[in-house]
Amino acid sequence: MNLKAVLGYFVLHRKEIVIRRTRFDLAKAEARAHILEGLKIALDHLDEVVALIRNSASPAVARERLMAPTRFPKFRPRPFWTCACSA
């Protein structure tokens, strides 16, 4: 291989590394955003959340009631494993 070919393959390799790292970081950021959106919803309904926890028999029951689909407004973010990047 000549120097031009070696450099071409190196640039392609670095491009692939940057793309993979960026997709990984994006997936982590979207997962974190999902958690933060849930906390925002809980803060918006703080009195209801506190009352629900206090009136629950156990932490498991409180968790189930908090995660019930009809408890809070619908929030359906994209799953964290998808990304806006083209494959």
Image: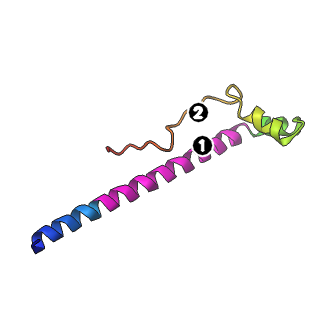
Q: Give the residues in magenta.
A: 16-45
- Residue type highlighted by circle 2: Phe
C-alpha separation, residue under disc 1 versus residue under disc 2: 8 Å
Give the labeled residue for mark 2: 75
Assign a secondary structure to mark 1. helix
Decide if residue 29 is on the left or right side of residue 65. Answer: left
N-terminal label among 1 and 2: 1
Assign a secondary structure to mark 2. loop
Q: Which label sits on residue 37? A: 1
Q: Position of residue 20 (x, y in %)?
A: 37, 56
Q: Position of residue 67 (x, y in %)?
A: 71, 34
Question: Which of the pair 13/78 is nearer the observer?
Answer: 13
Q: Are marks 1 and 2 in contact (CB under 8 Å)?
A: yes
Question: Which of the pair 1/67 is nearer the observer?
Answer: 1
Quarter of the figure that contains the C terminus: top left
Question: What's the residue at 58%, 33% (across, down)?
Answer: 75
Quarter of the figure that contains the N terminus: bottom left
Please say whether residue 63 is one of the residues in the magenta stretch: no
Q: Of helix, strand and loop, which mostly describes the magenta segment? A: helix
